[in-house]
Amino acid sequence: MTTPPDHTTGRRSLPLGNVTIDDDFWSPRREVVRTGTIPQQERQLRSGGQFEALRLGWKPGDPNEPHIFWESDVAKWIEAASYSLAKTPDPALDAAVDEAIGLLAGAQQDDGYLNVYFTVVAPGRRFTDLRDTHELYCAGHLIEAGVAHHQATGKTSLLDVVRRFADLIDREFGPGGSAEGGYDGHEEIELALVKLYRVTGERRYLELSKRLIDARGTQPFYFDLEREKRGTEGYFSFAFPDRPKEVQRFREYTQSHLPVREQSEAVGHSVRAMYLYTAMADLALEYGDDELRRACERLWHSITEKKMYVTGGLGSDPSIEGFGPDYDLPGIGGYAETCAAIGLVFWSQRMALLTGEGRYADVMERALYNAALSGASAEGTHYFYGNPLASDGSVHRHEWFGVACCPPNFARLLTSLEYYAYAEGGNEAVVNLFVAGSAAFSLDSGAVRLDIATGYPRSGSVSITVAPAETASFTVAVRVPGWAGGEAKAEVNGEAVDLASAVAEGYLRLQREWSEGDVITLELPLAPQRIWANPAVTEDIGRVALRRGPLVYCLEGVDHGVPVAALSLPRDSAFDTEVDEDLGIEAVVADGFADVAPHVGGDGDGDGDARLYRETPPDSRPTRVRAVPYFAWANRGQSTMEVWIRETAR
Ligand code: FUB
Ligand code: ZN
């Protein structure tokens, strides 16, 4: 296992091998990914042609033309499989990964170039349509896979391949290169190059990332220049026929309307935005670049105060798979792509590392436990692309997609949860997520292990046993989630800690001399909470959402005899919790009402008044309203669903 060299400033996440996860909530889900999701995705990639295309055998006229995204699907699968292999040896999976890497190596051209589409479908057109054709997006995913595979297995087979490709890109996008001054239409490679730098120590990869970031949005606009040079509109003109007329909108679509350092409002395609902002935060940390950091902070404000669903979902406008105007957060008809929530997990983690502020990890937790986790079914083989906050009953997960970005993204997130749970920096061990298991830190004062016991998120009790190699003075920083709202309690070795003075920037910072066996306990309040949206979100006026700890809840028709739109919850009704045996987690229940058509004749036979309009109000019948965690919805058949519940005064 290779540990990234220490040439970063501030905090960094722990290497995967330093973290063990043995957790009632996450371990079964990760096992499902290992035994169900990863094999299913391998089958899809084989039967769909993604593996086969790498043999470069496709010829004009053949069916199943290799698609411009395909390497990214294979790469994300390799990345997920690598993380899985790092934890659980599996010779068959290892062999399948080696086979895929062998195919990639075979598809690589002598000069290092690696992209099937531009090798067999559109040869001679490399780097001529950066805006649309995802060349650098695929390259970025390949680089991430190469880094993950090397870190997980110690092998360099894929790392060597992607380094040669990155070297070519460095040349082509550098002075005198064919794409000098260019950058990608779908950001991804920028964050990947930072990873490549960290694993190789080669600074030119970091500098290339910064060049791509700084070129973006400068004038003259590169995408205009390349179009003039090319003489055609670009690969996606069939999907965006109005693009030539909506110049600003489509510059925003790729976040290339302004230099990134001048951007303040999150606009355009939300997955692209997340990958871009992640790289900006990475670079802000690596270079100590305050201007980039301030841009990240402004964009953060734009998203979390005006554009983020309560689940951590992003993107309300399906026509661009991206952000709508401020406060535009429709339920039905919204988008909230799984990849965007995963991207928000990435960016939040980087912001937490950059700033040391817990509010960023709060959002990471929100996106992880809700909008990202809903992306796959309980059995790990069906997926959501969009994760809407309401459904008329027509929404369900799919086995695969023509553009299959979300499924392997989900797999790589769950298999690399280790990276998000902890961080270290200087003499501080940081706990960001509450996941049972252990974590080994290398602090200035020496080695320290933390053993975490918790039933989170089903229970709010977290016990952290501190085990330094020898008694030493250092800080353990434990995130106290913002949602705990001052109700959290903590003890060290049974003695109460005054959180009012010990919590700074969202972390309980315990600096003292620690000895083996010292125990920190944190008690987080898990009583269900009501949440209301700013009335500027007009769709949510008169509605309330429910949260229990990090989990946002929703109503599903399957739990009620009526469509969920008929249900309402009085503002003062008390909550109970009960275990949902099917879902294996607490449901929240309360007394509410169901609006039904009045009985005809009052004979109680259940026949409703079928007239479309009437002069009398509907019957509002007392009913038990039952909410389940959003991530778990659509696992019990198709039915209606709502996160934002109609609220009544009484
Ligand atoms: O374009 C590549 C990926 O496909 C995007 O990130 C997703 O939004 C989907 O369009
Ligand atoms: Zn996706």
Image (tube, rainbow, N blue to C red):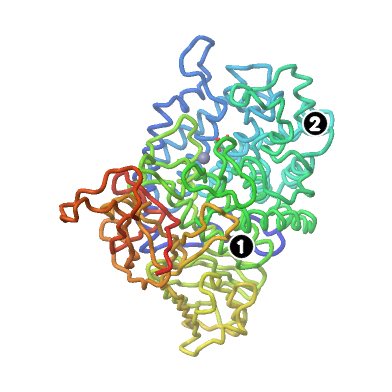
Mark 1 or mark 2, earlier in chain: 2
Closest to the camera, between mark 1 and mark 2, is 1
Q: How many residues crowd mark 2 within 10 Å: few (<14), some (14–19), many (20+)?
A: some
Element on which disc 1 rests: helix
Pick out the residue farthest to the top.
Answer: 61
Q: Nearer the viewer, residue 351 or 449?
A: 351
Q: Secondary structure at mark 2?
A: loop
Mark 1–mark 2 distance (CA, rounded to whole Å): 35 Å
Query: Position of 258 compared to 63: left or right?
Result: right
**Looking at the image, which is closer to me, 207 or 403?**
403
Hey, what amino acid is under mark 2? Glu
Say if 240 sits above or below 319 in the image.
above
Q: Quick one: which residue is furthest to the bottom in this view?
A: 495
Q: Which residue is mark 1?
A: 360
Residue 71 in percent (x, y) is at 54, 31
User: Is residue 169 placed above or below 464 in the rendered structure?
Assistant: above
When asked about the image quadrant of residue 425, the answer is bottom right
Dot 1: few (<14), some (14–19), or many (≥20) neighbours within 10 Å?
Answer: many
Q: Amino acid at mark 1?
A: Tyr
For label 2, the residue is 180
What residue appears at the point 68 percent right and 27 percent down from the top-left corner?
243
Residue 469, by quadrant, is bottom right
Where residue 422 appears, x then y in whole percent? 55, 64
- At x 55%, y 41%, the residue is 145
Q: Picture coordinates of residue 73 (x, y %)? A: 50, 35
| Residue 54 x/y as whole percent | 51, 25
